[in-house]
Image: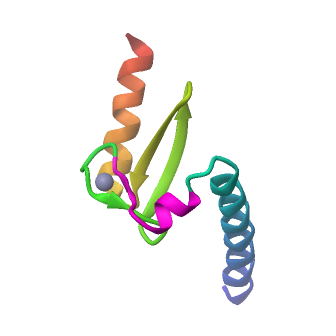
Amino acid sequence: MENNNSNRKSVLAVYEKDLDDLLQEYDIYDKLKEEGIECEVCKCKVTLKNLGFIVFIGKNLKVCCDNFDCYYKFLNERRKKLED
Ligand SMILES: [Zn+2]
């Protein structure tokens, strides 16, 4: 158990580092840090603290908060659109 936990933490740390780089590359790091970006689903303000995930659809950036309901709704919406 101990081992699993520490492995998981290091994976997350790398992931977060990459995410920061990605956000900076797309010039949205400051926006997320300061004013926040609207969650695609619940319309709350997403900042670095509650960022669930980001996706690029074409040139459009979609942001989702870390609420699991939003996550599932977002995925369902995407799936519906892909099936159309
Ligand atoms: Zn949300």
Relative image position of residue 63 (x, y in whole percent): 44, 47
The answer to whether residue 66 is above or below residue 11 is above
Highlighted magenta segment, given as a residue range: 29-39
Quarter of the image where one finds residue 14: bottom right
Reply yes or no: does residue 38 show up in magenta.
Answer: yes
Where the C terminus falls, by quadrant?
top left
Determine whether, in the image, residue 2 is placed left or right of residue 72.
Answer: right
Quarter of the image where one finds residue 29: bottom right
Where the N terminus falls, by quadrant?
bottom right
Relative image position of residue 72 (x, y in whole percent): 35, 45
Relative image position of residue 13 (x, y in whole percent): 70, 73
Q: Residue at x 72, y 67 (%)?
A: 17
Q: How is the image coloured?
A: rainbow
Q: Residue at x 41, y 14 (%)?
A: 83
Determine whether, in the image, residue 44 is placed left or right of residue 57.
Answer: left
Determine whether, in the image, residue 9 is placed left or right of residue 73.
Answer: right
Image region (quadrant) for ligand 1 = bottom left
The answer to whether residue 23 is above or below residue 78 is below
The answer to whether residue 20 is above or below residue 49 is above
Reply yes or no: does residue 84 show up in magenta.
Answer: no
Q: Residue at x 41, y 29 (%)?
A: 78
Q: Residue at x 36, y 40 (%)?
A: 74
Q: Nearer the viewer, residue 25 or 75?
A: 25
Looking at this rendering, what residue extends furthest in the bottom direction? 2
Number of callouts in the render? 0
